[in-house]
Amino acid sequence: MQTTKSLKYWQWRTIVVTMIGYAMFYLVRKNFSFSMPGLGAEFGITKTQLGIFLTLHGVIYGLSRYVVGIITDRNSAKKVMSLGLMLCAIVNILFGTSDVMAGWIVGLAGKAGDAAAISAVLVYVMGVLWMVNGFLQGMGVPPCTKTLTQWIHPKELATKMSIWNMSHSIGAGLAMALCGWLVMPHLGVDMSINPETVAAISANLNLDMTDPANVQKVTSFAAHFGAWRWCFLIPAGVAVIGSVWLFFTMKDSPSDVGLPEVVGKKKAIVTTPEEAAEHKAFVNKHVYRNRIIWTLAVTNFFVYVVRFAALDWGPTLLTESKGLSMANATTLCVVFEILGGNLGMLFWGWATDHIFKNKAHHTCVVCMVGVAICIAAFWLIPASASWWLMLVPFTLLGFCIYGPQALLGICAAQHATNRASATANGILGIFGYLSTIVSGVGFGFVAEHYGWNAAYITIFVCAIIGMLTVLTIWGAKATGYTEEDLHEKA
């Protein structure tokens, strides 16, 4: 009885610790979205260029999740995760001072003070730093996936990992609140009375200053000049502290605290050549030659197109296509994450275990139908409508999209089993973040050249394709575990 109580305590402690840890990864990743308007205003960085940043970051992140997944399946998850968070913090500090770095590089080239040259070099400096951040971000999810499958029984995994998955929306919501409510509207230097600064911003945004609305927009950016850098420096400080805390509080498996391993499981740390060969054969069978894993990965691609369209482009999309203020746009984005996302993950995780009999792929089909309906409803709301009216379908979109966002990874972990869960989720990560080719540069290009209606159509079509893809494995079993695995006593 005492062992059971201790296991439950450490199980929930591990869920909470990894939730907080991964939320901090989001603080030093999703901060970029709220710096985008400021970067465009101050340096003339275009939507297409910003989209390229998002795409390269996402593709490299997806590849990193795969590579780190393989490494994590063989090593200590705690060490991988805490190191990754510290390195992300360092890169964010460098990003927050990237304009200084660009000025230094231009000065070495003999063009000190040349604003155009600094802006041109800055694009490359930021691009390189954000690609490095993308790789380091891949050290977040695989350690969590491995750790949780060591601590949680397969029959409880959908519910409890859905609770853990709230860390995505909590982290993104905190980044939005910090950067969208505190940093961008309140920090920075007031340069609104400087005519050169105002003229430069209006030129960068290509705005007609005879329009009072444009004057107000430019003045707002000038009044908080340089605020964008604090979107990186403040979250970086939090991440440094969080990295140290994570190293001392996270536990890889029950045996680390003197408890028996969870039923039907053994600690997956490879130490000998024989174990390495056996592990490789196991991964080949349960991951690389498993059709279910690849179908889930393709579905993940389309799920992430929709999710990132709302998450990365949310502030820009809402202000430009629906005419919302930055404050109201931020509110919609935060509610999308905190309310819609969290409630969605909790409900759909519970529904998977209690209604859909642990078959997460069934739940995902239902969710994607809801996603398509919500996209259409939000798109058809006129820009003249109240932002409160827009809040309803946008929140429901978060409620529906965070179902498959959480459950596809859980389904992959179930079918790969705890011995290869990080590798399987790495493959899903590659496909999920390859989606930034569409949601990043593709979405930016479509919006810039064909308008926001074309962008909405793109998102809607991706939702339909995602639903049809996961529908093809409707008849699959709930997990890849054998009955002996599920009932074996440690």
Image (spheres, rainbow, N blue to C red):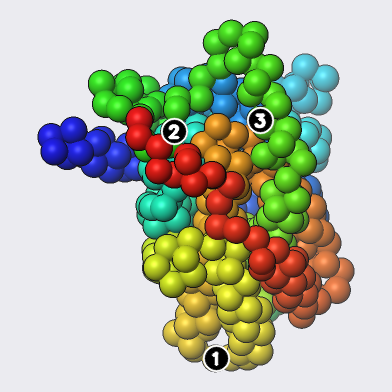
> N-terminal of the two: label 2 or label 1?
2
How many neighbours does mark 3 have within 10 angstroms: few (below 14), some (14-19), or many (20 or more)?
Answer: some
Q: Taking 312 as reference, is 105 left or right?
A: right
Residue farthest to the left, as pictured: 2
Residue 343, labelled with which disc? none
Which residue position holds label 1?
Answer: 385
Nearer-the-camera pick, 28 or 425: 425
Nearer-the-camera pick, 169 or 148: 148
Residue at left offset 26%, top offset 26%: 259
**Element at badge 1?**
loop
Quarter assignment of residue 206:
bottom right
Which residue position holds label 2?
Answer: 265
- Residue 355 in the image: x percent, y percent? 44, 72
Residue at left offset 61%, top offset 41%: 416
Residue at left offset 58%, top offset 75%: 366
- Residue 265 in the image: x percent, y percent? 44, 33
How many angstroms separate mark 2 from mark 3 (CA)? 14 Å
Residue 282, labelled with which disc? 3
- The quarter in which the C terminus is drawn is top left
Question: Do callouts 2 and 3 mark residues in contact (Cβ within 8 Å)?
Answer: no
Q: Taking 179 as reference, is 152 left or right?
A: left
